[in-house]
Amino acid sequence: MTYSGEPLFPGRRNRIPPWAMVVIVLSVVLVILVPVGFVVSFFYAWGKNHENLSFPSDDVTLSSCRQDAVTGRPVVEVLVASQAAQRGTFTVYVEFRDARGKDKGEGDSDPAGKRTVVFKDLERGGTETEEVVGPVPVRGRPECVVADATFLSTASAATSRPGAP
């Protein structure tokens, strides 16, 4: 295809010099690849730091959730089997519910209170059990749920380092 007539901008070159094209391409590549590299590096480091992560609630088991025949209050046995890397204190928040619910078995269950149980200075790999009684009587079969569990290390800084004697 050929153009005839006078150029639109006389005295101006119609092509970009090769060095300018190289600078433009390198700038665009850097603007795109550098942030992508940072994002990839962040998620790689995140994965390495969290690959063996476990939550305190994974170490907590509730068993024998039942109604006390004398008081009518819910009773649950809380078992903590510590899988933490060091010794520490587990705080378990247990929520009790009345399974009969507001409409005599229909719909959600009624709340029947909460209790907190603390397992102090549990060794790494250690287990401990405690029986917890709910604060109020329930009309039907109780439901017991771990509302939350937290872990606080009680190991000193010298013993928590991987290479410490």
Image (cartoon, rainbow, N blue to C red):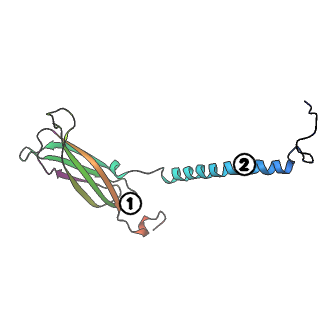
Q: Quadrant of residue 100?
A: top left
Provide the residue designation for mark 2.
Answer: 28
Q: Is residue 22 found left or right of 118 in the rendered image?
A: right
Q: Secondary structure under badge 1?
A: loop
Pick whichever of labels 1 and 2 is earlier in the sequence: 2
Query: Seen from this angle, which residue lies furthest left?
Result: 70
Query: Seen from this angle, which residue lies furthest top?
Result: 1
Q: Is residue 42 found left or right of 33 in the rendered image?
A: left
> For this rendering, which residue is in front, 22 or 134?
22
Looking at numbered disc 2 in the image, what kind of residue is underneath it? Answer: Val
State how far apart marks 1 and 2 are (Cα).
49 Å
> For this rendering, which residue is in front, 137 or 80?
137
Figure check: 157 above or below 149: below
- Residue 139 highlighted magenta (yes or no): yes
Is disc 1 surrounded by few (<14), some (14 to 19) or many (20+) residues within 10 Å?
A: some
Residue sitting at 37 percent across and 65 percent down?
A: 155
Q: Quadrant of the N terminus?
A: top right
Provide the residue designation for mark 1.
Answer: 86
Is disc 2 surrounded by few (<14), some (14 to 19) or many (20+) residues within 10 Å?
A: few
Which portion, as a residue range, is magenta? 128-141
Q: Quadrant of residue 145?
A: top left
The residue mark sitting in front, 1 or 2, is: 2
Residue sitting at 28 percent across and 57 percent down?
A: 91
Q: Quadrant of residue 105?
A: top left
Q: Secondary structure under badge 2?
A: helix
Q: Is residue 119 found left or right of 132 in the rendered image?
A: right
Q: Are marks 1 and 2 in contact (CB under 8 Å)?
A: no
